[in-house]
Amino acid sequence: MQLTKEISELEAMLQHTDKTNTTVSDGGVAWHLDHSLKVIIAICNALEESDPASFKSSFNFTKQAIFMTGIIPRGKARAPKLVRPKENVANEDIIRHLEVAKKLLSNVENLETNSHFKHPVFGHLNLKDAIKFMGIHTKHHLKIMRDILA
């Protein structure tokens, strides 16, 4: 399965859902967990629903910089409403999202190369780039969660 290491680390963070540190982030561990999983779910669903024939590749400097470094700068972007958690995230919701994300990720491996989703900043990302982005994005939020716990 794709993102196995990241999913395992997200799972390990379940024990810390009550932790917050507003000097690091306005959102606590639960918020970052839920957001990360919602992003994976939304991207996997978009990849599955996409028409590979309609994929449009284009150059995007911001995408290239982030993909080369593997780093998303903190505080520079705002999560779209679709993947923004509600104020009080229940552990049951996170656990459910974790199971859905695992299932969807296992299906992603069987999709066509030009399956894609449209990122609000990067434009169309094909399957390979979408998987890479999910990894970079998840690592970004895992780092924030580790900083909250430190």
Image: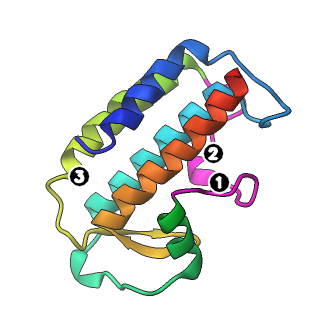
- Percent coordinates x, y for residue 92 in the rendering: 49, 18
Question: For mark 1, does the 10 Å Cα neighbourhood hold few (<14), some (14 to 19), or many (20 or more) residues?
Answer: few
- The answer to whether residue 72 is magenta is yes
- The answer to whether residue 125 is magenta is no
CA distance for labels 3 and 1: 23 Å
Disc number placed over residue 108 in the picture, else none: 3
Q: Are marks 1 and 2 in contact (CB under 8 Å)?
A: yes
At 43% from the left and 52% from the top, the residue drawn is: 134
- Percent coordinates x, y for residue 95 in the rendering: 44, 22
Rendered-image quadrant of the C terminus: top right
- Determine which residue is flagged by label 1: 79
Furthest residue toward right: 23
Question: For mark 2, does the 10 Å Cα neighbourhood hold few (<14), some (14 to 19), or many (20 or more) residues?
Answer: some
- Determine which residue is flagged by label 2: 84
The nearer-to-camera label among 3 and 2 is 3
Residue type at mark 2 is Arg
Q: In terms of image quadrants, where is residue 78?
A: bottom right
